[in-house]
Amino acid sequence: MPKNPFQHLAYFLHRLRRLRNYVEFSEANWEEKLASYNRSLANDDLNQKSFDGRRDHWADLANEFPQYHRKASFLMIFAMLEDDLTQLCNA
C-alpha cells in the first residue's frame, strides 16, 4: 500500500532527526580526538602509542577532517531531501 504524503513527510523528518544525531555524535568524536591529540603533544609515549609519533596532525584534526565530514553530511541530507521530495510529489 503506498504511503500518503503525510507519511512521507513524517518518515523524512524522522530520518533527518537521526542524521542530525549522527552529525552531532561525529562532531563530538572529532572534538574528543583533537583533545586526545593535544594531550599527546605533551606526552611522547602517548603520542607514539596513539598517533605513531606524528606531530603534524593538528590542522587536519581541527579543520580539514571535520569539514570533509560536514560536506559529506550536507550532500547526504540534500540527496535525502531530493529523493523524499520526489516520493512526496509521486504520492
Image: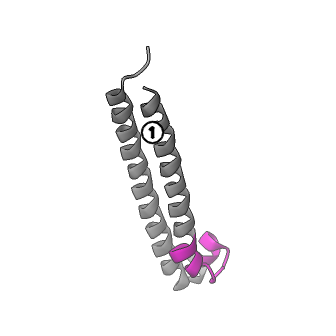
Numbered marks: total: 1
Residue 56 included in the magenta stretch of the image: yes
Badge 1 amino acid: Leu
Q: How was the colour assigned to the protein in this rendering?
A: one colour
> Dot 1: few (<14), some (14–19), or many (≥20) neighbours within 10 Å?
some
Q: Pick whichever, 29 or 23, lies toward us.
A: 23
Q: Pick whichever, 45 or 47, lies toward us.
A: 47
Residue 72 included in the magenta stretch of the image: no
Write the residue at 48% across / 66% down: 30
Q: Is residue 81 shown above or below 32? A: above
| Residue 2: % across, % down | 44, 18
Quadrant hosting residue 32: bottom left
| Residue 76: % across, % down | 53, 50
Q: Farthest front residue?
A: 89
Mark 1 sits on what residue?
A: 85
| Residue 85: % across, % down | 45, 39
What type of secondary structure mainly makes up the magenta span? helix
Secondary structure beneath label 1: helix
User: The C terminus lies in which quarter of the figure?
Assistant: top left
Q: Is residue 87 shown above or below 77? A: above
Write the residue at 49% across / 57% down: 74
**In the rendered structure, which segment of residues is drawn in magenta?**
47-64
Q: Is residue 52 shown above or below 85? A: below
| Residue 13: % across, % down | 35, 40
Write the residue at 57% across / 69% down: 65
User: The N terminus lies in which quarter of the figure?
Assistant: top left
Q: Farthest top residue?
A: 1
Write the residue at 40% across / 22% down: 3
